[in-house]
Amino acid sequence: MKKNYFKKFNRNLLGLISLIYIIIVTLISILAYVISPDKSINANMMDLSLHSRPPLFKVKVINVPNNLNSEKFSEWLVGKQKVDNQISIEKIIWIEDELYYQPFGSKKDFFKKVPISKFDNKLTNSQIEKKYIKTKTFWLGTDKYGRDLLSRIIIGSRISLSIGIIAVLISLILGVFLGLLAGYYGGLLDTFIMWLINVVWSIPSLLMVIGISLALGKGFWQVFIAVGLTMWVEVARLVRGQVISIREKTYIEAAKGLGFSNRRILLFHILPMIVPSLIVICSANFASAILIESGLSFLGIGAQPPVPSWGGMIKDHFRYILLGKPYLAIVPGLSIMSLVFAFMTLGNSLRDTLDVKN
């Protein structure tokens, strides 16, 4: 049976491409600080002289060591607390073995000095130039603060995937629990749970998330919890409907006749039968969570600066669309669209593969 599912899914090219894309984005988010050009925490290395530069922009930089270059495993996960000081320059000159540089965008006769003690004193002038002076490429350009846009996009993928995972887990725990109770026991319990579902369902999702976020306070985890608390109703309704149709099956009646406990029947005989439907709705909820978080960040209620959020990036740069630099808003917008599209397409493919009928 499992082989048939795999064969059926592999024949769905769009679903397979979506799954591969989601896996790639997940790997990128896990290894974000390994592959990101800016390895500072939240990719927050600013240089206002480089603000709003176009994709493929190149500039010479002096990497001034911070003398704290000890590699720690935690830095691969959350970024470096202290990174080398990168100075954007036009050119350098040596005067009596002292290094002077012209800051990027400054007047031609304006130079600043870099203390030679910052560098390895065993190196000659030419060796210092070769080791510490590089040409840096901003593949997607820079934002309005001069930060590397590619790095911000890469780190921002963690926010989108994290919100999806946590929101889906919260919605599953609440939705499955309440749905199982309502569908299996019925009666007043079912009436109360359905009343609660209808009340929550009648409130616009974004409005409810905003209300919960304001109640819990602005922040990273508050948004995750708020989004999860608004998505459980769909899961609960689905589970309730499935349980009502399954509880009348002959094998459930046989289990009751054999004296199996209600908990055993729910966990080992009913719940496994609704797993395919849960997989499909989780994929759709994942996409919805990403959209809601992006909307909240755009409104300024989601992840707070300097944490990079794709919705927050659009908020910071949507005005640049009219200033001839639309890529600053389009790039994070395309990131949101592509990931949401991938999850929705994957959900549709899984529904067809698992033959789910809701």
Image (cartoon, rainbow, N blue to C red):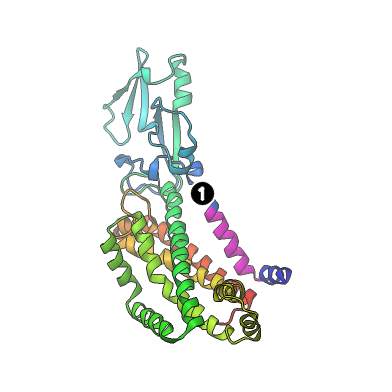
Q: Main secondary structure of the magenta part?
A: helix
Asked if residue 105 lies left or right of residue 238, the reply is left
Residue at 42%, 55% in the rendered image: 159
The secondary structure type at the circle numbered 1 is helix
Which part of the image, by quadrant, shows the C terminus? bottom right
The x, y position of residue 244, in whole percent, is 53, 85
The x, y position of residue 162, in whole percent, is 45, 57
Give the residue number, with chain letter if any, for mark 1: 30
In this view, the residue in front, 68 or 125, is 68
The x, y position of residue 344, in whole percent, is 51, 70
- Could you say which quadrant of the image residue 128 lies in? top left
The 10 Å Cα crowd at callout 1, few under 14, some 14 to 19, many 20 or more, is: some
The x, y position of residue 263, in whole percent, is 55, 73
In this view, the residue in front, 260 or 239, is 260
Residue at 43%, 83% in the rendered image: 190
Q: Is residue 298 magenta?
A: no
- Residue kind at label 1, given as amino acid type: Ile
Bounds of the magenta span? 12-26
Q: Is residue 19 magenta?
A: yes
In this view, the residue in front, 287 or 242, is 242
Q: Is residue 76 above or below residue 352?
A: above
Which part of the image, by quadrant, shows the N terminus? bottom right
Residue 236 visible in the displayed image: yes
Asked if residue 64 lies left or right of residue 207, the reply is right
